[in-house]
């Protein structure tokens, strides 16, 4: 939540007032959402009391009949189906009874229902009450400045680190539910849905995106080259015509009149007269008669991804797009973080897929073994902040460090990955800013432009944290995901506390 630091400008003062009222309104909505949660759990208590009453009376009707009759009553009042009400009652009971701290934050207006749902969905599988409290403490801290979407990813990571055995078992079960579905839509469209392991899904999307960007850039370059050639030809023709006019010479042999070429002044004037403004037919801009060169491909990246996907699935290669060999050579890129003790088989702490969360150890190790190079990242054992990055096959160390630290665009709420972002100097290089990790951060093109072309400002406050100041002079922190998701490793703590015997632990 933004912290106001004051503004004297009338425009930004008006914006500050709007932001203040929006925050107050959202807090009031959250408090009402908590009130509804409380009422739905009260309804669940009535269901349980009703069930006990029926059992005491010896009635052998369907066991869920009390739930049906009460959810039907609420559904009629709320204009919802009784099944939708049952689902809400179940979620409300879980939130209020198993996640007391989260419910308290909702009731205070510090988070909204979307944040609370993200916390409950990822943490509901943690059975141990102590572990669940630790999980809540970490994710509620992140909920203070993260969007619900990003909080959901953070919550998955924290839950996987707090109870890695359970997380691994759930991943194994989920992998057994892989499937492909088709959902028919309107207007001749259908939706193809694939439930796949996260690594495969993200890799497919990344490869399609890379191919789509390559195809788009090639199409634009071809269209620009054709336009440039047409402009050059037109300019050359104009120059020749001007030169011919100055010397009185005909422009070309075809312009030289013979004995039969007799035209009076009236005919010449009619030939050169512009067409009437109200003529009944106008050729469309894309008419073949008016086309001067290859037309620019105006498909969006989404459209290109979809077309390439269909090509590859149906023909085995992107045969319908440009240089198929070039596109086929493009490979997917995903960023995986594997704890060294997990890779060595000494720990069950999960590996992490950037932009998603925990993945299974076997997949991570296979990817690491097949990678042409991999980074070794040293994290602080108590803060989770990356300390150093080195590589067994050297490249640009600073870029690797920033990619490991940031994992995304560093504007609050932005999910864009580092591979699709710029590395920006927080203090401009031209103004004396150093090219160092404490003055660099990834920004997507949209927020990079926002930083330089608007009154938004940013500074680094240490430990990789960025503090953004809005036009209304409110401050918004953005912390590295590694620190937000960090859970002290019990295995690592044990190694630190053990007496050193001269042997490396791995």
Image (cartoon, rainbow, N blue to C red):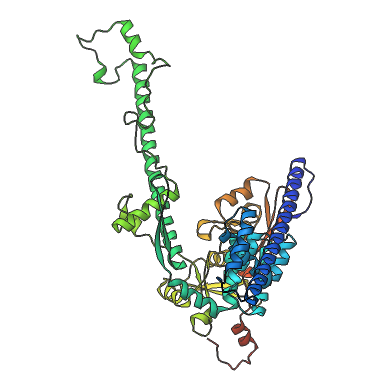
In the rendered image of this protein, does residue 55 appear above or below residue 271?
Answer: below
Q: Is residue 339 left or right of residue 385?
A: left
Of residue 58 and residue 198, the one placed in the foreground of this image is 58
In depth, the one of 487 and 265 nearer the eye is 487
Query: Is residue 436 in view from this perspective?
Result: no
Residue sitting at x 35%, y 54%: 310
Residue in front for this viewpoint, 183 or 251 = 183
When asked about the image quadrant of residue 500, the answer is bottom right
Q: Residue 54 location in percent, x, y?
A: 63, 73
Q: Residue 80 is drawn in which quadrant?
A: bottom right
Q: Where is residue 457 shown, x and y percent of the image?
A: 68, 52
Can residue 421 be spotted in the picture? yes
Farthest residue, direction left: 259
Q: Is residue 107 above or below residue 125?
A: above
Please provide percent x and percent y for residue 127.
Answer: 61, 78
Numbered circles on residues, count: 0
Residue depicted at x 37% and y 53%? 308
- Location of residue 183 (image quadrant): bottom left
Q: Position of residue 255 (x, y in %)?
A: 26, 17
Horizontal side, residue 312 vs residue 431: left or right? left
Who's the residue at 35% across and 17% down the image? Answer: 245
Where the N terminus falls, by quadrant? bottom right
Horizontal arrangement in the rendering, residue 90 relative to residue 367 (left or right): right
The single residue placed furthest to the bottom in the displayed view is 501
- In the displayed structure, would residue 51 be above or below residue 270? below
């Amino acid at each position: 939540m933004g912290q106001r630091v004051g503004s004297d400008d009338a425009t930004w003062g008006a914006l500050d007032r709007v932001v203040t009222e929006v925050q107050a309104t959202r807090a009031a909505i959250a408090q009402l959402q908590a009130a509804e949660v409380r009422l739905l759990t009260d309804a669940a208590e009535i269901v349980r009391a009703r069930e006990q009453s029926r059992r005491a009376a010896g009635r052998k009707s369907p066991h869920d009949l009390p739930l049906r009759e009460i959810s039907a009553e609420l559904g009629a009042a709320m204009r919802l189906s009784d099944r939708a009400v049952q689902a809400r009652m179940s979620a409300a009971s879980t939130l209020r009874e198993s996640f007391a701290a989260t419910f308290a934050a909702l009731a205070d207006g510090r988070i909204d229902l979307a944040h609370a749902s993200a916390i409950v969905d990822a943490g509901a599988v943690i059975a141990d009450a102590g572990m669940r409290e630790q999980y809540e403490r970490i994710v509620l801290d992140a909920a203070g400045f993260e969007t619900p979407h990003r909080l959901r990813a953070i919550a998955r990571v924290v839950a996987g680190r707090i109870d890695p055995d359970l997380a691994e078992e759930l991943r194994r079960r989920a992998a057994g539910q892989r499937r492909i579905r088709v959902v028919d839509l309107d207007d001749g469209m259908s939706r193809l849905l694939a439930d796949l392991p996260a690594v495969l899904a993200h890799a497919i999307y990344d490869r399609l995106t890379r191919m789509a960007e390559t195809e788009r850039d090639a199409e634009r370059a071809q269209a620009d080259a054709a336009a440039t050639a047409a402009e050059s030809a037109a300019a050359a023709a104009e120059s020749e015509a001007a030169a011919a006019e100055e010397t009185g010479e005909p422009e070309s042999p075809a312009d030289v009149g013979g004995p039969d070429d007799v035209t009076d002044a009236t005919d010449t004037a009619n030939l050169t007269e512009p067409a009437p403004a109200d003529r009944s037919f106008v050729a469309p801009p894309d008419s073949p008669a008016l086309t001067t060169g290859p037309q620019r491909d105006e498909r969006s990246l989404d459209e290109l991804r979809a077309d390439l996907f269909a090509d590859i699935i149906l023909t085995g290669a992107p045969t319908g797009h440009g240089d198929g060999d070039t596109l086929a050579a493009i490979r997917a890129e995903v960023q995986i973080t594997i704890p060294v003790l997990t890779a060595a088989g000494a720990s069950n702490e999960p590996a992490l897929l950037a932009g998603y969360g925990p993945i299974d150890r076997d997949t991570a190790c296979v990817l690491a073994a097949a990678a042409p190079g991999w980074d070794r990242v040293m994290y602080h054992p108590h803060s989770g902040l990356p300390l150093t990055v080195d590589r067994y096959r050297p490249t640009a160390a600073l870029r690797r460090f920033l990619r490991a630290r940031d994992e995304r665009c560093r504007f609050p709420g932005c999910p864009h990955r580092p591979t699709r972002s710029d590395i920006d100097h927080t203090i401009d290089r031209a103004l004396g800013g150093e090219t160092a990790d404490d003055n660099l951060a990834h920004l997507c093109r949209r927020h990079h432009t926002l930083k330089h072309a608007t009154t938004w400002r940013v500074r680094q406050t240490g430990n990789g944290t960025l503090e953004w100041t809005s036009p209304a002079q409110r401050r918004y922190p953005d912390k590295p995901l590694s620190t937000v998701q960090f859970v002290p490793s019990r295995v690592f703590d044990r190694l630190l506390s053990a007496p050193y015997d001269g042997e490396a632990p791995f």
